[in-house]
Amino acid sequence: MISLPELRAKALRRYPRVLRAHLAGEVLFPLLIPTDKTLDRGQGHEHIHAQQRELLAHAKNRTGHGYWLTTKLNRKTGQSEIKRVEFETLTDYLSFLNKAAEFAAFESNAALTAATVPALLLLPPLPPLLLDYAAEWPDLLLVCQYFQQHPQPNQYVRNLPLALPTKFIERHQSALRQLLDWLVPEHVRAEETDFFRRFHLLLEEPGIKLRFLDAAQRLHPAVSQCSLWASEFRQLNLASQRVFIIENLTTFLSFPPVSDAVAIWGGGFAVSLLAGADWLTTKQVLYWGDIDVHGFQILARLRAYYPAAQSLLMDTATFAAHHHGGQGGDFQPAELPQLTPTEQQLYHTLLRTNARLEQERLPLSCVAAGIEQAIARL
């Protein structure tokens, strides 16, 4: 005979079906729970009763709530045996599972959904969403209503005219993505995985720092450096013919004046932000990074966009003269066909040793000499 814990587990497995039926207006009750087990009748009357005692003690037949037991007299043994276990009403079922309060919230939110955003009632994962976000559901519906009316807001998320905490949408992206994908599919940028781009919300672009190394070529006499959004940077066409892309911020800020030149802070692998700036293809581009595995991998990435880019102070002579035991961090080895043969040789040494020479370790006199030599080679 089925035990009380087993009955509870079976009843709980039917809970999602009960929720779906409520949304669809279906009637499931009385709800039969198969017992799937037969009694052991070979050990006498007392053993037959013992197998059923727990179920009998907690049944609605005695307590007034919960599951109802239908029994039948076994003429051979003279014992009453449980033949059927069922919940007569939804109230009985919820009481047995201690789900009455949870279901009341589910029912309230389902009714609110039907009244405000009825299209969501057909969303397959709606029942678990209603349970998981019970407290936030009215506010989620408010967002859904807004996007139904304005499917392409083209505003910053915190500027949307909603009477909600400004961070609400950001904190509930997972639920909202499922809801909005269902509600406004024709307006979704399906190829975008970023929530904000997917639903036509504006994002602050990453910035690119720029220094004018030649005071005569500044955009304004008082402005020696500035920060531009990536889309703005791509539209530039500065007069300077030389562009130094520098990995670390300190060396970017302390880079010496150079005639007819600007400096860009590459920020490590953020050099990807420079892709698509066609005006750079007409300039003499030089990259200066740490002499380590990452430095050469960044150089290779930059050359994927600008094949003519030259390296600065990233050679064996500089490494031998100034490296004093520094070690790099974790890295993923990769073949870099964009490197020159001499760069390849140093790169493979670094792959083997994980050595590092940081830009900041080079004295300013060495930097000045390296810049002069690089310009002479251009």
Image (tube, rainbow, N blue to C red):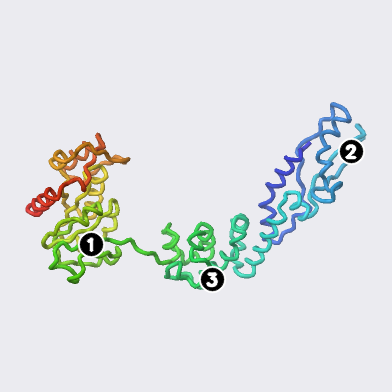
* Image side of residue 15 versus residue 236, left or right: right
Q: Is residue 109 above or below residue 309?
A: below
Q: Mark 3 touching mark 1, by CB under 8 A?
A: no
Q: Which mark is residue 324?
A: none
- The disc at residue 210 is 1
Which kind of residue does numbered mark 1 sit on?
Leu
Q: Residue 333, how many percent across, how many down?
A: 29, 39
The CA span between labels 2 and 3 is 62 Å
Q: Is residue 133 visible?
A: yes
Give neighbour class at mark 3: few <14, some 14-19, many 20+ (Cα, 10 Å).
few
205 left or right, relative to 39: left
Decide which of tag 2 and tag 1 comes sooner along the chain: 2
Q: Nearer the viewer, mark 2 or mark 1?
A: 1
User: Which amino acid type is shown beneath numbered disc 3?
Assistant: Ala
**Dot 1, crowdedness within 10 Å: few (<14), some or many (≥20)?**
many
Q: Confirm whether residue 341 shows in the render.
A: no
Q: What whole-number distance in Å separates the C-alpha atoms at marks 3 and 1?
A: 40 Å
Quadrant including the N terminus: top right
Residue at image coords 22%, 64%: 225
Say which element carries label 2. strand
- In the rendered structure, the answer to whether residue 110 lies left or right of residue 170 reads right
To which residue does mark 3 refer?
163
Question: Which numbered circle lies on residue 80?
Answer: 2
